[in-house]
Amino acid sequence: MKHRTFFWFILPTLSAMILFIALPIVSVFIQSLFVEHEQVLVVSESCGPFGCTPTTTVDTAATAALQEEQPLGRFNGLNTYINRSHLAFAEVGEAWRNTETFGAFWKQIINLPFYRALIFTLTYTAVVTPVVIALGLAIAVGVNNLPRFLKGPSIFISLLPFLVTPLVGSLILFWMVDSDGVIGATIQRIFNDPSLSLKASTALTWTMLIVYGVWHTLPFSFITFYAGLQTVPEDTMEAAMIDGASKWQRMIHVIVPHLAPLMSFVTLMLLMDNFRVFEPIVSFKAEAHATSLSWIIYNDLRESGNPLYGSAGATSMMTIIGVVILLTPVLIRTWRDFSRKAH
Amino acid sequence: MLLKRLAAASLFAGLMGSAAFAANCGPEGQSIRILASDFPAIHAVVDAARANCGDAAAEFTANHTTEARQIMNAALTPNPAEYTSVILANATLTQLMNDGLVRPLNDLVEKYKDSIPPNVLITIDGNVMAVAFMANSQHLFSRKDILEQAGVDSIPASYEEVLEAAEKIRAAGIMEHPIAMNLQTGWNVGEVFNMIYLGHGGEFFAPGSAEPSINNEQGIAALETMKALAEYAHPDHLTHASNETQGLWESGQAALAIMWGSRGAPILDDEGSTEEVTSNTVLSAAPTVGGGSIPAATLWWDGISIASNVSDEEAEATFAALISGLTPEMVAENNDDAVWLLPGFEPGPAAAGVAGTVQGGARPYPMIPQIGLLHAALGSELTDFLKGGESAEQALADVETAYRTSAKEAGFLK
Amino acid sequence: MATKAQSRIAAPAVSTKSRTRIQPLTVISLALVALWLIIAAFPFFWTFWGSFKVQSDFFSKTDWQNAIYGVNTIRQTGSPFTLEGYHGAWVDEEFWRNVINSGIVVFFTVVISLTFGTLGGYALARSGRRYAFWLLMAALVFRAMPHITLVSGYLLPFFEWNIWGILPTTIIVLVAINQPFTLWMLHSFFLNIPKDMDESAMVDGCTRFQAFRHVIIPVMWPGVITTGLFSFLLAYNDFAVTAMLLSSENETIIPAINSFLGTTQVEGKVMYAVAAVVSATAPLFVLILFFQRQIVSGLTAGAVKG
């Protein structure tokens, strides 16, 4: 394709992405290298309907004067990236020196918010991604073999976990897995343990989040594979059947190769989305047992009143780097495909 | 009850005409733009202001959104600001003042002092920064039938008595988990620490500085109290916030609860619960703790503020309009929607807990610029202690380190 | 693993004997589909049933069976089913306004996303050059950025430029942040359309754009509709962007539902939210039934025969 033609085809999408994503990423990165100016505090007294208390306030005029001089704040280099809320080099080093056994070292590491979040994030990604791909493909094939009149309703029902907004979907599930809810009570009955609570133990909370993750993202891989199945060339299938290939053999030798590009697409998207897992943690109120990188960002931006942009920016940049590292194998594959197709 | 309502309604109808007539709306033809949370009581104030002064203004808009806290700083930063007023609370006033986005109201208060009720001015360093109109706090909810059944004669007045009562209820085999509290990891658990720590007489920061000072005796005592309470709470307590504790209460599965005063009315109404629960629910002041004399709770208010980056005329028109809404008639019509700090409020049973807590001299939620950072650090670091994996000292040390990290970034510490 | 081994053993026998016999693999596959459909549908049907109950039944702490029989619903309203939630959401809270807003946002987001995405995706699939690859990679990196960071970064400029709170801003933001996904998905689909098709058209004298219009557009619908479905769902379900960038009068359904849920201090009207969710799903049912026919019926045929 000519450069010029390519340029006009790509222009709309590229300008949207540059304006609303690329520039913000650059600005977030710059922001993450700075910290706020020193806040000039003045001691004062605050009075209200409940009486007076001594307090401090920010001298906004003095702080604004500092701001005028250096609008971005104080340059901090990569220090935000290595402070305790993030990579915590100093704390990890200290833990390494001061602990005798690996267990004790590990205990200190998971006391650090970033590593604690990273561990859950990676576990979640590593479990949910392959399960969703395998089940999505299996169900897509199954639905594809259904009689025609059942396909429509099946597709609709399969999409339901995606359709009901997570806001309410997880609220309802949260109530269902409560020890007094329909799922929670059933599980108690199955295991014959009336004190079993999915929300009170770390292991069960993780399982619950992972099961929810699979349930919620399965429609995506299902629909994509289902659409891909519609494009499997029929003559190839017929040829394979005439050659006496079993269903399973056809699946492995015809369908899976045909779906390979879609498969890497789905893998990419799932890895990325799972690595940014966030919604279920908040909806299931699982913060006590599981946090993720995106949750840390959310916490920095929302929980402390005036947002910690630098800290959130640093975690965001590390999320991007994490995603790139995770995706490398798939990307190399895509690169090979790409080079092959090009020549 | 019905008679009382009727009387209030007719009083309201009678005054309505004169109130609207008398409302002083300040400069005419201005644009009034209000940002507020999506609460019934705040709707009532804003709607009353609109009814009084909407016609005198060229524009009267109100954005009631659950995300008000998240957008307010950005919305007030441009000049002119997106909104002329934000209806805010203790914590959000601090959040806006940190960026210098709300203006002192001294001259406006002076000008409209006849319409402003007494004792509602929020003054910081001699400047009036907000006019409060409603209050809220955590307090004790008790089931008097269950307490009697377990042999507890009086409503507990201290956390020690709460624990004692809980033990009696458990020992009597009535309930395994009689206590309900909002201990959800994050803001809620941090807030529980705040109130019990204040009840122990603790201070969050070294005086006049941003150095944290919670890793001390009071801090450890507060954590020990929390842990003792959690022993008697539902096993899922780390996921419990207001909706869950209210659910527990209404289904009769808790006998002693520390919940928000604003949940009093919905708990006492006839919806969602049984007669047995509602008729035996007693609302009382938050308990004291550790021999302290004040209720262990944090007092909150909601009030009016005016943006810095708007013209003086718009500021005055907005202030006048909102003040015109704070009338006894508005209160009478919405009496049970809030604990009003305004004349005409008739405290019902749902307000008893907040009233008791205020009278007991509980401390207001601190309006210190860096409190949000400490609160966030508490919210995320205390859970390990409650789960049992960490000592109280370690948990508090973690909180202080986490706070220091973010306070350095925000410029409060070097 | 057992299934795999079994099928391997069963395979030669089946292929030589009658084809009409039901194979174990088929049974397993059907069972899996049936199980999945139950798991996928159960929470929704539970919600649907529960939306006609009062809150203390549907979210019962006493006994989950209350959600089925409606003990409190009978006590409070005199009948086991109530339309209170629906009435509250649609009449008292004027939920239809949010539905209209959502309709506008979703329609324009899907149309613009797909227009931008098909053009870009087609170009990327057909250009064999390195920069095309790197553009795809850049799009991936863009997509890795957590939305919440992006959105909180938008706030201040949008307020400064006075474009905060209105629907067009939200639409363009949703288009932009979903563009990497759309681009990648359509790019994958275009790779499946044989190159010879449009290239032979170009040999016949068409320009690239004419070839795209006359040859590619007619066969690209399965991919476009599937991608459109996801653009639709992303825009429809979005909370992070719509909650932060829309004022209350322009609110779409998801932030509206969120505001029904209440806050720490104020009790929500949770049943309004449940009813709103259920009623918002009804039009989707129609929509998906409509489009699944497009996906299933032979529109795909032309694409891959070549």
Image (spheres, coloured by chain):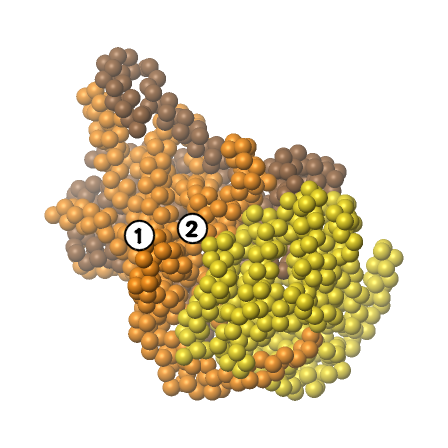
Q: Amino acid at mark 2?
A: Leu
The part of the image, by quadrant, that contains residue A246 is top left
Tally of numbered tags: 2
Residue plotted at (54% across, 35% down): A193
Chain depicted in yellow: B
| Image quadrant in which the N terminus of chain C is located | top left
Q: Which residue was labeled with disc 2? A: C234
Instruction: Chain letter for mark 1, please.
Output: C
Residue plotted at (55% across, 55% down): B184
Chain depicted in orange: A
Colour of chain C in the image: brown
The part of the image, by quadrant, that contains residue B42 is bottom right
Residue plotted at (45% across, 65% down): B398
The part of the image, by quadrant, that contains residue A293 is bottom left
Where residue B74 sits in the image (x, y, percent)?
A: 48, 72
Q: Is residue B315 visible?
A: no
CA gap, disc 1 to disc 2?
Answer: 14 Å
- Ranked by sequence position, the earlier of labels 1 and 2 is 1
Check the image and report above or below for C195 versus A58.
above
Residue plotted at (72% across, 75% down): B324
Where residue C98 sits in the image (x, y, percent)?
A: 56, 54
**Along the viewing direction, whichever of C71 and A186 lies nearer the viewer:** A186
Please check whether the numbered discs 1 and 2 fall on a single chain: yes
Q: Which residue was labeled with disc 1? A: C183
Check the image and report above or below for B155 versus B408.
above
Q: Residues within 10 Å of mark 2 (few under 14, many from 20)?
A: some
